[in-house]
Image: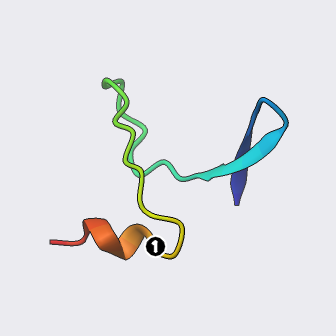
């Protein structure tokens, strides 16, 4: 797992592609998971 330190908070992140593309930030609710973004 990878974490980003944001103002003293550890934020988990995941990268799905190594392409040079614009980043896309998706936020879900506190009791949700990345499954919220599944088709």
The local crowd at label 1, few if under 14, some if 14 to 19, many if 20 or more residues have their Cα within 10 Å, is few
- Taking 15 as reference, is 9 left or right? right
- Taking 19 as reference, is 31 left or right? right
In the displayed structure, 28 sits above or below 32; it is above
Give percent across and percent down for residue 31. Answer: 51, 76
- Determine the residue positioned at 42% across, 51% down: 27
Quarter holding the N terminus is bottom right
- Determine the residue positioned at 37% across, 47% down: 26
Check disc 1 and report its element: helix, strand or loop: loop
In the displayed structure, 34 sits above or below 15; it is below
Give percent across and percent down for residue 2. Answer: 70, 51
In the displayed structure, 17 sits above or below 19; it is below
- Determine the residue positioned at 41% across, 68% down: 34
Residue found farthest to the front:
30
Give percent across and percent down for residue 24. Answer: 34, 36
Q: Splitting the image into 4 quarters, where does residue 25 fall?
A: top left
Residue found farthest to the right:
8
- Determine the residue positioned at 27% across, 65% down: 37
Residue found farthest to the left:
39
Tell how many labels. Answer: 1
Residue closest to the eye, 12 or 14: 12
Give percent across and percent down for residue 17. Answer: 38, 45
Scheme by which the image is coloured: rainbow
**Residue picked out by circle 1:** 33
Q: Splitting the image into 4 quarters, where does residue 20 fall?
A: top left
Quarter holding the C terminus is bottom left
């Amino acid at each position: 797992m990878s974490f980003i330190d944001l103002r003293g908070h550890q934020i988990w992140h995941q990268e799905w592609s190594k392409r040079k593309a614009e980043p896309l930030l998706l936020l879900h609710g506190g009791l949700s998971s990345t499954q919220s973004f599944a088709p």
